[in-house]
Amino acid sequence: MYIQTKDLTLEDGEHEVVLRASDKVFSGYDIEVETNMIQKKDGVYIVREQETWDSLPIYEIKNCTVVRLDFTQYEYFTGIKRRKTVSEKIRKQYNPPSENKIMRKTLKKILDHLGLEDEKFSKYNQKVEEIISKIPKKESK
């Protein structure tokens, strides 16, 4: 069996978790092992848990053999709900127009500091500044 792996550092050290398995050679495989542990379902080897949307790894390689990884024993995996909550809060607060303004102002400062002129950027920046100046800021109450 041909296996693609990824190294993960967990609380008790390095773990080489199985990302993909196949009985045929594929581009990017890391190791070839003899094992009957990984089961096939609908023609595909199942190397990740199928019960939740989290899709956590269920096998790892130890001493060139496939063994089960008990992901419930590691905070990295059990803390996934917290990471998803934090990620959702960040996604809600992310404001692309604000990010674009920061990047545009930063690029302008860098170009000015280096004494460089980019005609396309200058036209774009001038147009954006003109649009902004036509729309007055709302006063916060």
Image: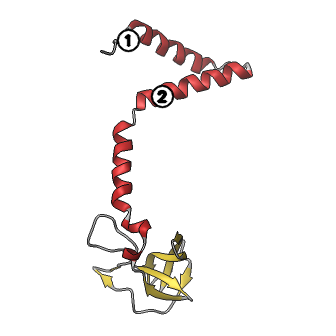
Residue on which the image places disc 1: 137
Taking 120 as reference, is 133 above or below it?
A: above
Q: Name the secondary structure under disc 1.
A: loop
- The disc at residue 16 is none
Residue type marked 2: Asn
- The disc at residue 100 is 2
Taking 119 as reference, is 18 above or below it?
A: below
Marks 1/2 in contact by CB < 8 Å: the verdict is no
Q: Crowding near pointer 2: few (<14 within 10 Å), some, many (20+)?
A: few
User: Which sits earlier in the primary sequence, circle 1 or circle 2?
Assistant: 2
* Distance CA(mark 1)–CA(mark 2): 18 Å
User: Residue at left 40%, top 92%?
Assistant: 36
Residue type marked 1: Lys
Residue in front for this viewpoint, 61 or 122: 61
* Residue 15 seen in the current view: yes
* Residue 26 seen in the current view: no
Question: What x and y, as percent, mark residue 126?
Answer: 53, 12
How has the structure been colored for display?
A: secondary structure
